[in-house]
Image: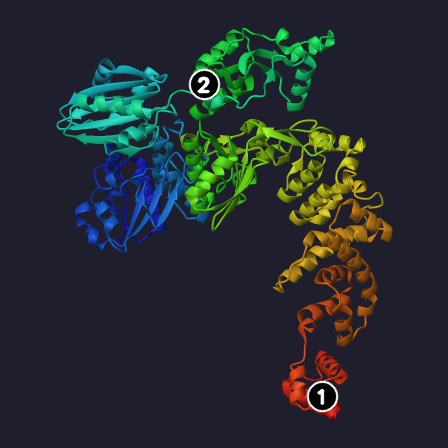
Amino acid sequence: MDVITTHTNADFDALASMLAAKKFYPDAVMVFPGAQEKSVRDFLSASHIAPEFARLKDINTGDINRLILVDVKSYHRIGVFSETLCKEGAAIHIYDHHPYSSEDVKGEKEVIETVGATTTIFVEMIEKEGLPITPLEATIFALGIYEETGSLSFPSTTARDLNAAAFLLKRGANLNIVSSYITRELSPEEVDLLSELIHSSRDIVIHGFTIKIAKASRDEYMEEVAYLAHKLRDMEDTDAVFVLVMVEDRIHLIARSRAHEVDVSRIVQAFGGGGHPGASSAVIRDSALEEVEEKVVKLLNETISPVKTARDIMTSPVKTIQHNSTIKDAGDVLTKYGVNVLPVLKNNAYAGIISREVIEKALFHGFGDSQVYEFSTTDALTVTTDSSVRDIESMMIEQNQRFMPVVEGSRIVGAITRTDLLRSLYEDILRKGRHYEEEHRGKPSIGRNISQVLKSHFPPDVFGILKLSGETAEALGCKAYLVGGSVRDILRGETNLDIDIVIEGSAIAFAKALGERLGAKVKSHERFGTAVIMTESLKFDVATARTEYYESPAALPTVEMSSIKKDLYRRDFTINTLAVKLNPKEFGHLLDFFGAQRDLKEKTIRILHNLSFIEDPTRAFRAIRFSERFGFKISKHTLNLIKTAVKINLFEKLSGSRLYDELNLLFNETEPAKAIKRLSELDLLRFIHPDISITKPLIKTFESIEETLAWFKLLFIEEPLHRPHLFLMALFEGLKPEGREKTLQRLLVPPHVRREMIKGIEDSMAILSRLQEASKKDIYYTLKPLSLQTIIFTMAKATEKQKKAISLYLTSLRNTKPFITGEYLKKLGYTPGPVFNKILKALLEARLEKEIESREDEIAFIRRKFHL
């Protein structure tokens, strides 16, 4: 027997979810595990759907083979059905929207989404499957969504809830009925209870958050206490409210919160209840009101995180300068590292700050050789790591100070800029506002915390490694971040297991500690502050957060230890600057300093700063690669900067090996025909060789190579092909022999590869005509000496008739050989010598031309052609 059930004290979301689940489990029995809220009971009594629900007393839990839980996943809240959880062979299916908890039931099938109502999940499934629903069903589903989301006004409401509601309206949902059950006037009894709650309430402040606790007693339970808790919170404008109502020997605890940091579900779970971070409830037996109140306050103090401090938002480490350095030196440091203010140190102790504005004016007036300390601001305000962000905000605004040093004793440990402060304020606004999600279902939410997205996209072992990485970093007193393509691609809805972790601290020490916990191999590179960790299933990179500067255009960068923000700033494009915090306290928190989420949404490749191509011209090739690989456009400003770099011939300074590497990646990850056109449009081909140009035959060859590779892949021939080299051969084929040699040398192509590519181009030119009217024997002897790479390149340029010849060779002739060997010839009585080669060659040619097929045919052929 299949049973659909929900939580005790069912609300409209529970009712609607049960009815919706029935559409996917048509043979299942619907049954409530306990009571229903008064409004639900009133609705059931006024409608004709009540008979569709079985009575609890008629259900034998021992007969249940599959239990479908909707709008609940806590075993505390499903009544007698918790017995089924222990039944061997019973399948558990869960559909819910509540946050994960350590006491959650584990299901064979789990559909758990971050939406405002469980009903939304089912409505999306109904719409996707194209299932019909009646206007009454649409109205019930709308009741579930509207009640659970506060008529689409609670912070937990998502765009998906709005879309689901719109779908239901199109299917005939009656909002008059919905509003009659959700919007109503308070009864005299409810007004009386609300008045008592207001007069008995007291406010407590914990870490800057105001929480109201209200108590009352009643002889009989009043159904709508939860509604009154909402009213009380909204009337009093507090961050959270806890309502305690004593009825006989039970206390009904209802909690509501509008602050992200005050997670009321964690408090309520301690009393055996459950719900959301913003709305939870529990029923407590055999306790006094004062006792429960005291425990609530104690739990609040233990669970509410402090407000943000300087430690949470500061940039660390900070680039500094010694007090006796010259003004000219300070100007060079500012330019090299791209900063605007430098803390000044005297005997390694903080002594003041100096800004770019002051340095530029000092240089203008001829004080380049003066000491930095002489022009420093020595009375700038400072804060400690424990200073609250609220205090720092006031200080920076009131004193008009754009750079706030963070010190511990006399040592500078970080700094806070106006950008850091604005980002912190913006994140607070986002947390208190609605949750933002992708417009298209099935793609991950671009929210501020993506821990659930990480969990759903990564295999369990990889997700476990990320969690352990954060715990290891925390134990070492440093910070760990997941960065790079894996974060970018998750937000694009794809899984990328190319894991890169950046550490604010020592990556080597972190890697050794994590490797020990994982029982993994660790390969360290002390010089670069990087390491590679190798488990049985995963290999991933760890690096110390770094900054870099370039001594000259197109040179390799000089790298130094820095902060995560500086580390991300040195990357090529905004879409590659995302990071995710891994330390336990903020695991899954997404960092986006440079607008990466915007550019992912707008499908745009955008450079980080105006000198980016000057410092590293290979980024122009990467821009094309990412643009073609993802189907993104290159921003107008980025294109203009590439054109500027081309105009000043910057790419001539680019080392050949780096250009060769980029071309390999470009031809490996994109559609090469499109990529080569983009290179031509931006006038970049001339930096490979001035005589290379785009022609119709060249594009045709590129497209034909793609088609040939697709065909070859279907043959399942287990021999490696170097895909990019085929396109490079096509690109260089039109050059004169000396031009090919010069270009390959310029690119610093390895000598053996260079020889293979040149020979391949020359051989392909020579053999095509020989394949036009060739016999099978001729085809074999023509292609046998060639490398597979050359054969595939030749096939891409061949006519249909020539392609058939090459195809015949690869699929049949290539592996042709006689059954008879030299040893067998001895058994037949032949004496070893030159005759062996004649016999074996004759056998091969006869097999190629299908004159003989079996061993017996070969023996007869030998006896007929070669007499003893």
Alpha carbon distance from label 2 to label 1: 93 Å
Residue 765's image quarter? bottom right
List x then y, in percent, for residue 589. Answer: 46, 31
Closest to the observer, 198 or 466: 466
Q: On screen, 488 above or below 811?
A: above
Q: Is residue 33 visible?
A: yes
How packed mark 1 is, by other alpha carbons closer than 10 Å (few <14, some 14-19, many 20 or more), is few
- Of callouts 2 and 1, which one flags the residue occurring earlier in the amino acid sequence? 2
Residue 834's image quarter? bottom right
Residue 831: give its label.
Answer: 1
Quarter of the image that includes the C terminus: bottom right
Q: On screen, 521 above or below 439?
A: below
Instruction: Name the element at disc 2.
Output: loop
List x then y, in percent, for residue 796. Answer: 74, 59
What's under tag 1, amino acid-wise? Thr
Closest to the observer, 487 or 148: 487
For image coordinates 47% across by 40% down, the residue present is 512
Q: With 373 as the anchor, is 253 left or right in this view?
A: left
Closest to the observer, 776 or 168: 776
Q: With 741 as the anchor, is 631 left or right in this view?
A: left
What's under tag 2, amino acid-wise? Thr
Residue 385: give its label.
Answer: 2
Quarter of the image that includes the N terminus: bottom left
List x then y, in percent, for residue 150. Answer: 36, 28
Residue 345: give its label.
Answer: none
Closest to the observer, 163 or 843: 843
Q: With 815 as the anchor, is 398 left or right in this view?
A: left
How packed mark 2 is, by other alpha carbons closer than 10 Å (few <14, some 14-19, many 20 or more), is some
